[in-house]
Image: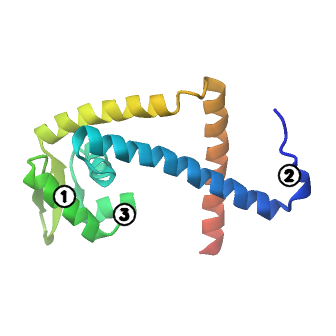
């Protein structure tokens, strides 16, 4: 592997900035392609897919606030998506015993079946998009990204 010649010339802070920009660019390229395909193939948005994904991993349902926290988006955004999912018969709201204000959101059987198909297709898209990477590339990136996450978590904890 060839080292970047700028590593010896640029301050480390500049290289960290460069790394951050490259991470953002790669993430945006992947996300934009997934958004495009979801819209073209299914007339879905990525947030709709994300909400259904969260619900599919929680068969007992999730409160709106839990979905919002998981996806790191406002409750208002989640409400609009859940409204559409319930209108389309893909999700339903049920009351939370002992809490008149709270509602759990669950996927219907139709929602589960449809999401299962879409998530399999999503996996195929990701496989295609990242198809230029071999197993060693992937393993190395996963290790480095795990290390990045650890570092970020430590930095966040130090700020609290």
Residue 6 shows which numbered tag?
A: 2
| Nearer-N-terminus badge (3/1) | 3
Residue 19, visible in the rendered structure = yes
Check disc 1 and report the residue beneath it.
Answer: 82
| Disc 3 residue crowd, few under 14, some 14–19, many 20+, Cα 10 Å | few
Residue 41 on image: x %, y %: 26, 37
Residue 152: quadrant of the picture:
bottom right
Residue lying at 24% horizontally and 31% vertically, measured from the top left: 117
| Disc 2 residue crowd, few under 14, some 14–19, many 20+, Cα 10 Å | few
| Disc 1 residue crowd, few under 14, some 14–19, many 20+, Cα 10 Å | many
Is 139 drawn above or below residue 55 in the view shown? Answer: above
* Display coloring: rainbow
Residue 72 on image: x %, y %: 40, 63
Residue lying at 8% horizontally and 47% vertically, measured from the top left: 89
Pointer 3 and pointer 2: residues touching (CB < 8 Å)? no
Q: Given the current orientation, which residue lies at the most extreme top position?
A: 135
Q: Nearer the viewer, residue 41 or 138?
A: 41
Question: Label 3 vs label 1: CA separation?
Answer: 15 Å
| Nearer-N-terminus badge (3/2) | 2
Question: Label 3 vs label 2: CA separation?
Answer: 39 Å
Residue lying at 30% horizontally and 42% vertically, measured from the top left: 38
Q: Which of marks 3 and 1 is in front?
A: 1
Side (left or right) of 7 relative to 156 = right
Check disc 3 and report the residue beneath it.
Answer: 69
Residue lying at 36% horizontally and 35% vertically, measured from the top left: 122
Side (left or right) of 158 relative to 6 = left
Mark 2, secondary structure of its residue: helix
Residue 74 on image: x %, y %: 33, 69
Mark 3, secondary structure of its residue: helix
Residue 120: quadrant of the picture:
top left
């Amino acid at each position: 592997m060839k080292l970047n010649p700028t590593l010896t010339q640029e301050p480390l802070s500049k290289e960290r900035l460069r790394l951050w920009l490259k991470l953002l660019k790669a993430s945006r390229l992947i996300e934009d392609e997934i958004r495009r395909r979801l819209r073209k193939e299914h007339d879905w948005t990525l947030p709709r897919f994300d909400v259904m994904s969260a619900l599919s991993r929680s068969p007992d349902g999730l409160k709106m606030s839990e979905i919002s926290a998981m996806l790191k988006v406002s409750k208002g955004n989640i409400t609009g998506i859940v409204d559409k999912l319930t209108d389309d018969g893909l999700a339903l709201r049920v009351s939370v015993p002992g809490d008149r204000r709270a509602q759990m959101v669950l996927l219907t059987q139709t929602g589960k079946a449809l999401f299962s198909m879409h998530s399999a297709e999503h996996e195929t898209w990701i496989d295609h998009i990242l198809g230029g990477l071999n197993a060693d590339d992937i393993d190395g990136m996963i290790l480095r990204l795990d290390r990045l996450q650890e570092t970020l978590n430590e930095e966040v904890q130090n700020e609290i």
